[in-house]
Image (cartoon, rainbow, N blue to C red):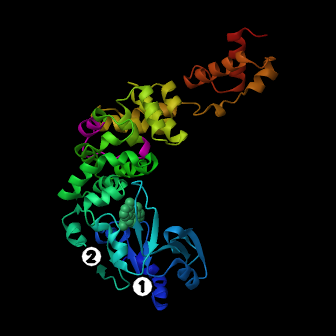
Amino acid sequence: LPVEFVQALPVLKKIIAHGFEAYFVGGSVRDVLLGREIHDVDIATSAYPEEIKAIFPHTIDVGIEHGTVLVLAGKSEAEHYEITTFRTESKYTDYRRPDHVDFVRDLREDLKRRDFTVNAFACDVNGEIIDLFDGLLDLKERRLRAVGSASERFNEDALRIMRAMRFAATLDFAIEAETFVAMCERANLLEKISVERIFIELDKLFLGADWRNGLTLLVQSGAWKYLPAFQLPALEKMLTEISSTFHFQNSEQAWAALLTRFTQIEVKNFLRQWKVSNDFAKYVSDLVSAYAIKKWDLLSLYQFGLEKVQLVDQLKNACGLEIDENYAIELDHQLQIHDKSEIVVAGKDLMKELSLKPGPELGQILRKIEQKIVQNQLKNERRAIFEAVKKEWKLK
Ligand code: ATP
Ligand code: MG
C-alpha cells in the first residue's frame, strides 16, 4: 500500500470496527496500480452518511445528497477524507446527471455504476484488489473499456465520452473497440452536456502527457463536431504542426495553440461560448494576439509581459519556428518598468508640478510618458519626466 493509503487505514478500520465495509476506490487505486502519483484518496463504504457522522466526531457535509461526507481525521488537509456511501444512480433523463442516487449496502452495485473498468477497482485494508470487470487485464493492456454496455453507459451520461478521451491522454491508454464505436455513435449527446463540465475534461486532456492521443480520438470519433465553436482545421493543425514531444505548460497555452488559426472575432466568440472566466479569456486572447507578432520589441514585450511572451515563444518553437528564447529575456532586462504603476510620476504630480488640469490631455501625456520610458527614450526619473513634458507640450 502506498503511504497515502497507509495514512488513511485507521479511518477505514474504524468504519469496519463499527460493522460496515470500507474500501479505497476510484482513480487513486488505478493510479497506484499504474505506479503513478495519486492526488486524492477516495473511500467508499456500506455505511450511510448518518452512520459515518455517528462514527467520527469531526465531519463536514460536503455532498451529503450524493452520499459524501468529509471526515476530518486530523488537522492537516492530508488527513481529510471524502467518504462516499455505496450508491447506484438511477434514471438519467437529461443525459447529464442522475435524477437521484440510491444508497446501497453492496459494493458490487457501487462499482457497476463507475465509468471504466480501470476506474472500478476497490482495494481493501489488506491491499487486496477487488476487480469485478477484468480491469486488471485492461490495465495491463493499457486500454479503457466501459463497465457494462458502453452504448448504455454513454447514453446515461455523455460526459463519459469526454472522460474516455481525457484518460486516453493522461494515462496513454487506447480505447477498446466496442467502447470506441459507442463513443462515436453517442457523440451527438455531448450537445446536452454543459460546456463547463466538458471544458474541465478537455483541459485535463490538453495537459495530459499524451494529449495527442486524446486529441486524435476527438477527431477520429467525430466528437469535436458537438463541441461549441470547434473547427477541424485548428485541431488538425495542433496534431500536425506541434512537435510530438511538446507538453503544454498550462491550460492557457494549450487553448491558445488551438486558437492561433482563428480570427480575432472567432477567438472572442469561442471563449464566450465556452463560458470561461474573464481572466482566462483575456490571457488566452493575449497569447493568440502575441502569437501573430513576428519579432518582439520593447513595446510588445511590455504589453504582454515576459510570462506570456515566453509561452508564445515555446509554442512557436514547438511548431518549428526556431525562435531564440533568450532574446525576450535580454529584452526584458532592458525594460525600465514592467507596469505603469512603476512610473515615478503620477497624474497628480504633473498637475501639481506643471499646473496641468485633469482631463483627456493629461491622460495622453501620461500614455506618451509611459511609451517613451518603455522604449528607453526617457529615463524613469522625476526631473527627466517633468523636463520632457515641458519640452514636448511647451508648458511654462
Ligand atoms: P483523477 O485522477 O483525474 O481524479 P479519477 O478517476 O479519480 O481521475 P474523478 O473524476 O475524480 O476521476 O472520479 C472518481 C471516480 O468516480 C472515477 O474513478 C470513477 O470511478 C467515478 N466517476 C467519476 N465520474 C464518473 C462518471 N461520469 N460516470 C461514472 N463514474 C464516474
Ligand atoms: Mg479523482
- Give the x, y percent position of residue 313: 38, 35
Disc 2 is placed on an element classified as loop
Disc 1 is placed on an element classified as loop
Magenta residues (range): 235-252
Q: Which mark is residue 21?
A: 1
Looking at the image, residue 81 lies above or below residue 350: below
Instruction: Examine the image and state in which quarter residue 20 appears.
Output: bottom left
Q: Residue at x 40, y 40 (%)?
A: 255
Judge from the rendering whether residue 218 lies leftward or rightward of residue 26; answer left or right.
left
Judge from the rendering whether residue 267 lies leftward or rightward of residue 371; answer left or right.
left
- Give the x, y percent position of residue 129: 30, 79
Q: Which mark is residue 132?
A: 2
Indicate the amino acid at tag 1: Glu
Q: Is residue 238 visible?
A: yes
| Front position in the image: 326 or 269 | 269
Report how far apart the C-alphas of labels 2 and 1 lie in the structure. 17 Å
Q: Residues within 10 Å of mark 1 (few under 14, many from 20)?
A: many
Indicate the amino acid at tag 2: Leu
Looking at the image, residue 240 lies above or below residue 183: above
- Give the x, y percent position of residue 293: 41, 25
Asked if residue 95 is among those painted magenta in the image, a careful observer would answer no
Q: Furthest-top residue in view?
A: 394
Quarter of the image where ligand 2 sits: bottom left
| Placement of the C terminus among the 4 image quadrants | top right
